[in-house]
Image: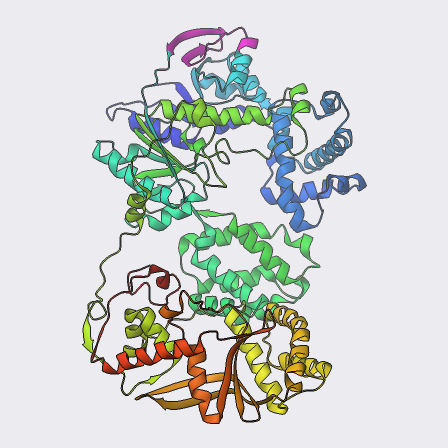
C-alpha cells in the first residue's frame, strides 16, 4: 500500500495527475489539495467554522465605533457587504504571514497610515472578540487557535508538496511541524519571478539557482536532486484591433493543435480576463469547450426573468416592456403587489419559495434554494427596509454565483491559477495585454509598498511577479503556446512579453479571422437578387423620398416599394432626432392653426412653448431636449415677427398636395406655405442635418425635395421662393439651384416614364448601405 501523500495546489492538478497514472496500478497515492491538507493538520476544539453571512454580520457589528467612519466605508448593509471583502483580504494576509497586527505601527516609519492602522487594529480585535464569544472559527484566526493534528501527520509517512508559487509563513510552520512525524519533500521550480520564495529557502540554509527544478528535503534542509528547466516550447504571438477577433484566433488554434496530433483534453485556453469567457461561449456552437469557471448565474432563465420583472416594475419603458414580453410576465403582478411594502408586512422567504413553481431547471433551483437558506441570517438586520431593497440584494447575491458547465467540451477554458502544476500539449492565452498580465491586485488598499516592505508583507510587485511565474511555468511545461492581445489606442501588449523574449508575428490577415466567425450561410434570396423585372412609373404617385430611393439604390426601391417589405423598428426609450423633429413640427402646425401671423415676439414664443408642452413625450430626456429648443425659439420668434411685418401670412401647414406633372402624379406633404399678396413662399422645417448642393455637385443630385414642393404649391399661386427653415441655426436657407434642378428633375421624369422594366442590382456606392434597413437581406451587412 502506498503511504505517500501528494499535496497539489488545486483539484484540477489532482485530476490531471490521476489521469497520467497507469491504469494497472493497484495502490494510488493519496492526493490532496494544499488547503485541505492544512485543514486536516489543524483543528480548533469547541469552535465551528463561520459561514459567509455570519462573517459579514459580525464584522459589521465589530465596526460599530466612531473612528471607523474615517476608513470611508459606509456601514449601511449594502455598501458594507461589498467593501467587507477588502478588509477580510487584508486580515487574511496578516494571518497567512503570521504578522501581528500590533506591529504595523512600527513598520509605518513615517506615520502615514497611523490613523488607519489604529482603526484596523481596533476592528480586528473587536471582530476577534465577537468570534471567540460565539465560538466561531474564522480562518484568519487559525494560526492563533489551532492544535497540530499529529495523528494525521503520523499516518502520512511520506509527504510530497508541489510548491507552484508561494508558501506562506503559516504553511511553512505547519510543514516544519510535520517533519517531526513524516518525511517531507518539497518540489519547487525557480525563476527570476519567485525570488521571494527562494529567499525563504535561503533562510533555512538552502541556496537555489534560477531556472531549475528541485526536490528538497525539509527534514534534512538539503537538496535531494535538481535539474535544469529546458525551454523547448514553440511560442507564437499575434495582435488584433478588436477583442472579438481573439475568439476566431482561439478557434483556429484549437483546430491547428488537433491537426498536429495534440489530444483535445491536453489543450487549454487560458483567460487572464475571465470576462472573455462569455464571448467564447457565444461562438462555441459545437460545444468543444468546457469552462472551469462555470457559467454566470446571470445567464440563467430564473435570474433573467426575475431581473426583467423588477426592471419593469421600477421603470415602465419600451425597452423593459419588450424584455418582459420575451421572458414572460407571469411574476409581474405577484412581485408588484409586495415590491413597495416593508419587510415587516410580509414573509419574504416564504414569498421567494412560492415563486419556485415558475421555474423548472434543477441546477438553477438548487442555487436559488441555497441563497434562500443563506438569506435567513440576513433578514433580521433588514427589518426596517422595503421589499424592494431585499429583492435587489437577493439578485446581487445570485449574480455572484456560477452554474457548473455541463457542455462536455474536451478543451478546457480556465484562469491562470487553475494551470498550476498542470502540463498541457497546447496552450492558447488571450488578452495578454498590459491591463491583464499581470493583473493588478486590490490587496494594497490599506498600506503602501514602503510599509509592506518594512513589515515583510507581500507587495504589489511580489504578487505581480508571482503571476509572471505562473505564466512562465505554464509556457515552459507546454509543447506549443499561442498568445494574442488587442492592440489599440486603449490597449497594448504586456511588457511581460518582452521579458519572456516573445515577439509578435502576423500569420494571417484579420479578414481571415473575421471570416471564421462570420462565415455567412448563403440565404435563399434569389427572388430578391439581381433580376430585371417588368415595371412602369406611369401609374405611380411619385414623392421625393420615393424618387430619392430609386436614384440611390434600385435594390432598396424594389424591397420597399415593389415587395413592400417594411423595416423592423425596435422600440427605444431615448428619443431619436427625427422624433424631436416630429414633436416640433406638430407644435408649429398647432401654432399657426390658431393664427396666421404674430406681431409680438413674446406672444409667439409663449404660444409656441404651450404647444410644445402639449405634444412633448413622457421621456425626461425628450423634455430636456425640447426645453433647450425653447431657448432657441426666442430667436425664431424675433425672425418670425420681422417676417410677418413684410406682409407674409401662413396659409398652410403640414398639408398634403397632389398634382399631375409631365405625365406623372407628384405628391408630398409641405411643412409650411406662406403667402404675401399673390406670391407664394414654401418653407421646409429642418431640425437635423440636410444636404445643400453646390455648383459642382448639383448635376448629380438625388434629393429634389424643394423642387417637388415648388411644383406642388403652384396650385396656390405663383411660387416666388423655396427654402429650408433651419431650426437649429435659426436661419432661412433658399434653394440656390432651383431652376437648374427643375431641369434635371424633368429629364429624370422623362426617363422614368420611358421605363418598362427595372434592374434590381445592388448599388455601387457602399456609403448608401451604412444605415440601410435592408443591408442584411442584401448581404451588405
**Residue 271 in the image, given as x and y percentages of width and height:** 42, 37
**Residue 58 in the image, given as x and y percentages of width and height:** 68, 42
Q: Nearer the viewer, residue 394 or 496?
A: 496
| Quadrant of the rendered image containing residue 666 | bottom left
Q: Quadrant of the N terminus?
A: top left
Q: Quadrant of the C terminus?
A: bottom left
**Residue 486 in the image, given as x and y percentages of width and height:** 43, 39
Direction from residue 257 to residue 171 in the image, left or right: right
Q: Is residue 589 magenta?
A: no
Instruction: Judge whether residue 86 can be spotted in this image.
Output: yes
Instruction: Judge whether residue 408 can be spotted in this image.
Output: no
Direction from residue 235 to residue 81 in the image, left or right: right
Q: Is residue 767 above or below residue 22?
A: below
Residue displayed at 73% across by 35% down = 123
| Quadrant of the rendered image containing residue 359 | bottom left
Residue displayed at 68% across by 29% down = 447
Q: Nearer the viewer, residue 725 or 43?
A: 725
**Residue 528 in the image, given as x and y percentages of width and height:** 23, 70
Q: How is the image coloured?
A: rainbow
| Quadrant of the rendered image containing residue 694 | bottom left
Q: Nearer the viewer, residue 115 or 1?
A: 115
Q: Is residue 329 above or below residue 223?
A: below
Residue displayed at 22% across by 31% down = 260
Q: Is residue 638 above or below residue 146?
A: below
Q: How many numbered dots are placed on residues in this image? A: 0
**Magenta highlight range:** 202-227
Amino acid at each position: 500500500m502506498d503511504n505517500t501523500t501528494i499535496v497539489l495546489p488545486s483539484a484540477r492538478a489532482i485530476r490531471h495527475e490521476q489521469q497520467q497514472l497507469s491504469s494497472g496500478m493497484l495502490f494510488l497515492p493519496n492526493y490532496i489539495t494544499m488547503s485541505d491538507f492544512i485543514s486536516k493538520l489543524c483543528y480548533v476544539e469547541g469552535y465551528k467554522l463561520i459561514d459567509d453571512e455570519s462573517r459579514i454580520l459580525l464584522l459589521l457589528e465589530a465596526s460599530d465605533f466612531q473612528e471607523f467612519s474615517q476608513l470611508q466605508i459606509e456601514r449601511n448593509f449594502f455598501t458594507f457587504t461589498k467593501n467587507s471583502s477588502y478588509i477580510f483580504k487584508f486580515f487574511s494576509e496578516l494571518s497567512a504571514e503570521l504578522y501581528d497586527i500590533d506591529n504595523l505601527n512600527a513598520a509605518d516609519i513615517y506615520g502615514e497610515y497611523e490613523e488607519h492602522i489604529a482603526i484596523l487594529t481596533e476592528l480586528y480585535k473587536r471582530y476577534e472578540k465577537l468570534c471567540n464569544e460565539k465560538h466561531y472559527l474564522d480562518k484568519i484566526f487559525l494560526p492563533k487557535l489551532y492544535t497540530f493534528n499529529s495523528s494525521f501527520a503520523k499516518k502520512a509517512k511520506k509527504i510530497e508538496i508541489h510548491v507552484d508559487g508561494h508558501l506562506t509563513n503559516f504553511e511553512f510552520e505547519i510543514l516544519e511541524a510535520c517533519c517531526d512525524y513524516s518525511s517531507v519533500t518539497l518540489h519547487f521550480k525557480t525563476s527570476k519571478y519567485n525570488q521571494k520564495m527562494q529567499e525563504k529557502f535561503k533562510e533555512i540554509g538552502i541556496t537555489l539557482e534560477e531556472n531549475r527544478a528541485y526536490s528538497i528535503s525539509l527534514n534534512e534542509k538539503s537538496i535531494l536532486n535538481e535539474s535544469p528547466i529546458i525551454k523547448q516550447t514553440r511560442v507564437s504571438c499575434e495582435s488584433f484591433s478588436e477583442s472579438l477577433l481573439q475568439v476566431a484566433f482561439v478557434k483556429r488554434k484549437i483546430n491547428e493543435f488537433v491537426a498536429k496530433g495534440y489530444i483535445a483534453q491536453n489543450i487549454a485556453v487560458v483567460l487572464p480576463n475571465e470576462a472573455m469567457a462569455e464571448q467564447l461561449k457565444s461562438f462555441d456552437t459545437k460545444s468543444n469547450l468546457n469552462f472551469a469557471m462555470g457559467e454566470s448565474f446571470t445567464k440563467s432563465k430564473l435570474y433573467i426573468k426575475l431581473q426583467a420583472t423588477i426592471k419593469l416594475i421600477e421603470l415602465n419603458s419600451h425597452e423593459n416592456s419588450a424584455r418582459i414580453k420575451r421572458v414572460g410576465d407571469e411574476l409581474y403582478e405577484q412581485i408588484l403587489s409586495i415590491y413597495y411594502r416593508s419587510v415587516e408586512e410580509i414573509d419574504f422567504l416564504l414569498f421567494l419559495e412560492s415563486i419556485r413553481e415558475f421555474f423548472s431547471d434543477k441546477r438553477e433551483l438548487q442555487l436559488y434554494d441555497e441563497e434562500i437558506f443563506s438569506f435567513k441570517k440576513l433578514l433580521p438586520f433588514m427589518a426596517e427596509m422595503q421589499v424592494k431593497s431585499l429583492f435587489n440584494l437577493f439578485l446581487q447575491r445570485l449574480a455572484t454565483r456560477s452554474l457548473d458547465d455541463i457542455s462536455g467540451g474536451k478543451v478546457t477554458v480556465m484562469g491562470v491559477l487553475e494551470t498550476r502544476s498542470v502540463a498541457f500539449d497546447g496552450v492558447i492565452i488571450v488578452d495578454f495585454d498590459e491591463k491583464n498580465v499581470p493583473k493588478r491586485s486590490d490587496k494594497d488598499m490599506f498600506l503602501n509598498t514602503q510599509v509592506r516592505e518594512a513589515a515583510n508583507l507581500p507587495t504589489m510587485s511580489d504578487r505581480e511577479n508571482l503571476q509572471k511565474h505562473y505564466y512562465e511555468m505554464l509556457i515552459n511545461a507546454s509543447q506549443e503556446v499561442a498568445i494574442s492581445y488587442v492592440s489599440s489606442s486603449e490597449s497594448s501588449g504586456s511588457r511581460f512579453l518582452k521579458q519572456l523574449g516573445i515577439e509578435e508575428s502576423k500569420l494571417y490577415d484579420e479578414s481571415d479571422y473575421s471570416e471564421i466567425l462570420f462565415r455567412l450561410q448563403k440565404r435563399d434570396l434569389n427572388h430578391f437578387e439581381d433580376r430585371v423585372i417588368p415595371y412602369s412609373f406611369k401609374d405611380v404617385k411619385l414623392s421625393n423620398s420615393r424618387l430619392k430611393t430609386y436614384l440611390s439604390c434600385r435594390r432598396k426601391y424594389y424591397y420597399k416599394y415593389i415587395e413592400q417589405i417594411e423595416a423592423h423598428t425596435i422600440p427605444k426609450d431615448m428619443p431619436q432626432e427625427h422624433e424631436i423633429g416630429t414633436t416640433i413640427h406638430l407644435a408649429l402646425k398647432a401654432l399657426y392653426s390658431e393664427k396666421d401671423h404674430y406681431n409680438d415676439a413674446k406672444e409667439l414664443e409663449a404660444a409656441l412653448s404651450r404647444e410644445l408642452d402639449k405634444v412633448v413625450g413622457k421621456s425626461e430626456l425628450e423634455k430636456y431636449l425640447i426645453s433647450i429648443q425653447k431657448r432657441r425659439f426666442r430667436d425664431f420668434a424675433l425672425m418670425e415677427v420681422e417676417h410677418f411685418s413684410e406682409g407674409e401670412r401662413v396659409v398652410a401647414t403640414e398639408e398634403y398636395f397632389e398634382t399631375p406633372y409631365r405625365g406623372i402624379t407628384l405628391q408630398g406633404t409641405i411643412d409650411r406655405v406662406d403667402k404675401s399678396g399673390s406670391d407664394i413662399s414654401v418653407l421646409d422645417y429642418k431640425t437635423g442635418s440636410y444636404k445643400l448642393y453646390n455648383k459642382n455637385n448639383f448635376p448629380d443630385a438625388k434629393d429634389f425635395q424643394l423642387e417637388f414642393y415648388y411644383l406642388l404649391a403652384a396650385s396656390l399661386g405663383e411660387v416666388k421662393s423655396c427654402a429650408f427653415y433651419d431650426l437649429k441655426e435659426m436661419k432661412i436657407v433658399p434653394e440656390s439651384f432651383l431652376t437648374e434642378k427643375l431641369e434635371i428633375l424633368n429629364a429624370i421624369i422623362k426617363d422614368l416614364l420611358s421605363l418598362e422594366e427595372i434592374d434590381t442590382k445592388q448599388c455601387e456606392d457602399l456609403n448608401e448601405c451604412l444605415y440601410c434597413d435592408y443591408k442584411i437581406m442584401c448581404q451588405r451587412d
